Image (cartoon, rainbow, N blue to C red):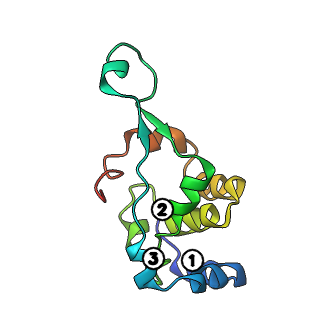
Amino acid sequence: MPVDYDELKKDREQPWRVELRNRLTAKERTALPRVKMSEQPPQVRNRNFSEVNLGLKDEQATAEARRCLDCPNPTCISGCPVNINIPGFIKQLERGDFAAAVRVLKETNSLPAVCGRVCPRKFSAR
């Protein structure tokens, strides 16, 4: 499905997004440290079939979301095989509205939890 950049631009100019974007400069955002997701230690995970990644706490997800620049022309969307509105998702996380973040994911992907585990691109930014 092609990306509707006009719709994305309208979404990006919502007052709450402008306010979020203005809280930090791009330089300040890029200086924020990456939040590392906790994982099961190798000596534990080699004996079970549980998830290796343990996820992020709400505060960690919000802190990681602050690193997003909310680009005017987000290439992360066109680089995503299912064209997820990644900046929209991340900005909802930064805002602390996790339910809205899930809704953004489900706009273009009915199985986001599966894709989050198998996407070959999710680790390319590390």
Crowd class of label 3 (few under 14; some 14 to 19; many from 20; radius 10 Å) = some
Q: Could you tell me if the residues under marks 2 and 3 are in contact, i.e. CB atoms within 8 Å?
A: no
Disc 1 from disc 3: Cα separation:
21 Å
The answer to whether any part of residue 85 appears in the image is no
Q: Which residue is mark 1?
A: 8
Give whichever of discs 1 and 2 has the lower sequence position: 2
Q: Nearer the viewer, residue 68 or 113?
A: 68
Q: Which residue is mark 3?
A: 29
Work out whether 51 lies above or below 36: above
Q: Which residue is mark 2?
A: 1
* Residue ID at (46%, 22%): 50
The answer to whether any part of residue 90 appears in the image is yes
Query: Mark 1 against mark 3, which lies toward the viewer?
Result: 3
Give whichever of discs 1 and 3 has the lower sequence position: 1
Disc 2 from disc 3: Cα separation:
30 Å
Query: Mark 2 against mark 3, which lies toward the viewer?
Result: 3
Q: Residue furthest top?
A: 47
Amino acid type at image mark 1 = Leu
